[in-house]
Amino acid sequence: MFNVLSAYAGDPILSLQLAYRDDARADKTNLSIGLYYDDQGNVPRLKSVIEAQARVAQSTQPSMYLPMSGDPAYCKVSQALLFGQDADVIKQGRVATIQTVGGSGALKVGSDVIRRFFPAIEARISNPTWDNHRAILEGAGFKVDTYPYFNRDTQRLDFDAMAAALRQLPAQTLVLLHPCCHNPTGADLSPAQWDEIVDIIASRQLIAFLDTAYQGLGEGLEQDAYLIRALVKANQSFLVANSYSKIFSLYGERCGSLSMVCANADEASRALGQMQQAVRRNYSSPPAYGASLVQTVLNDAELNALWRSEVDEMRVRIQSMRERLHQGLCAAQPNVDWDFLLAQRGMFGYAPVLAAQMNRLRDEFGVYIIESGRICVAGLNTGNVDRVARAFAAVL
Ligand code: PLP
Ligand code: TYF
């Protein structure tokens, strides 16, 4: 019966993760998957989350189904984080928000809703982007193409090419954007550049779909929300997918949210209904536990402040590792301009040239990177960064 099924190639990032796990070398280094590690090389448990776990554990309530749209308190704090505390657009009831199964679930539900009501439009993603963007959009039925984003010669954002391409798009094209910490390149737009993109979105009537999986790990929690708030200011209707996987170190709990910013409260209530229906058709309702942790942290003034300091700490550590890697590479190869690394933000560094050396890095040095040349800078620590810099210098 099922003999007709073809083999699935798997996700290259997840396959590499398994290969790393099975590597017996003691000095192996995993810079492949996008996980945040602390300076001891462990995926941390945040203090704010540990305290929330203790509080949630005291509950004597049975495990009930959540509504299709998830925990209302969780949706409310998610709105505050994304749009700003006391944002007018929230008070006006113009933002419909649901809890989702990670950021991925938000991308899927948002894609399903837009596809259903705009069946003729196409979707555009940055070149390059997180592989799953194409997979999820195509899975929802969209024809997907790319817009230019990164110039491999300068190793930097190609803003002019990006803006020019977006200016050419037909009205209502769905455009996926990374508000901060671009995956995989780490090349972000400045606020002034985002302003220009917002003007294009408004004048071309594009549908922006923001995917924010690393808020706080670029410049800071508020700064990284610049694009979200600029689109609100420009009175645009758009979607935001957010993920708590990294910034709460809660990968397995699948915490995310999807917001649709609408022209008025009536439109938002219909948007909420359509998101609920898409959830119903996909998985009925989201899981409760992780959302209860996120909600407990964000709703408690003390835990919220502790959590913000923990996110700051992650950001500062990543940045210091980026600088150490840069120093190591400059020392090993003083004739090469490595400064592009310092311009990058978030969990990733990107050096397309490393792609060709990926196998040597893994086989000779036990350093795992993915084939795009992306390095997970958050996998570096004081114990491995100099060794990694030497390994890169040796193969380049
Ligand atoms: N969007 C981007 C850009 C990502 O890098 C990721 C990966 O973690 C996600 C979305 C998905 O997040 P989640 O693991 O919460 O589904
Ligand atoms: O880009 C990454 O490495 C992260 C983690 O199917 C990830 O976003 C990778 C692959 C995947 C899910 C998450």
Image (tube, helix red, strand yellow):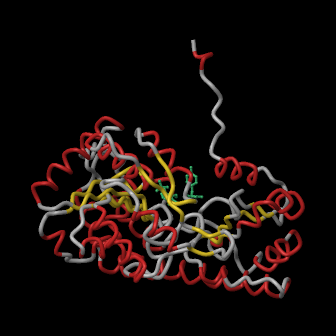
Look at 55% across and 59% down and name the residue there: 129
Could you say where residue 71 lies in the image, as x and y percent from the top left?
26, 54
Most extreme residue toward the top, as rendered?
1
- Asked whether, in this view, residue 194 is left or right of residue 389, the answer is left
**Residue 371 seen in the figure:** yes
**Closer to the camera, 142 or 47?**
142
Most extreme residue toward the left, as rendered?
266
**Closer to the camera, 360 or 197?**
197
Q: Quadrant of the N terminus?
A: top right
Could you say where residue 353 lies in the image, as x and y percent from the top left?
76, 67
Q: Quadrant of the C terminus?
A: bottom right
Look at 40% across and 83% down and name the residue there: 192
Q: Above or below — where is 134 with respect to 152?
A: above
- Asked whether, in this view, residue 268 is left or right of residue 314, the answer is left
* The image quadrant in which ligand 2 is located: bottom right
Look at 60% across and 82% down and name the residue there: 343
Q: Above or below — where is 361 with respect to 252?
A: below
**Residue 303 seen in the figure:** no
Residue 139 figure quarter: top left
Residue 281 figure quarter: top left
The total of numbered circles placed on residues is 0
**Closer to the camera, 67 or 363?**
363
- Asked whether, in this view, residue 353 is left or right of residue 302, the answer is right
Could you say where residue 106 lies in the image, as x and y percent from the top left?
37, 52
**Closer to the camera, 334 or 25?**
334
Could you say where residue 146 lies in the image, as x and y percent from the top left?
51, 55
Q: Above or below — where is 119 with respect to 12?
A: above
Look at 45% across and 76% down and name the residue there: 216
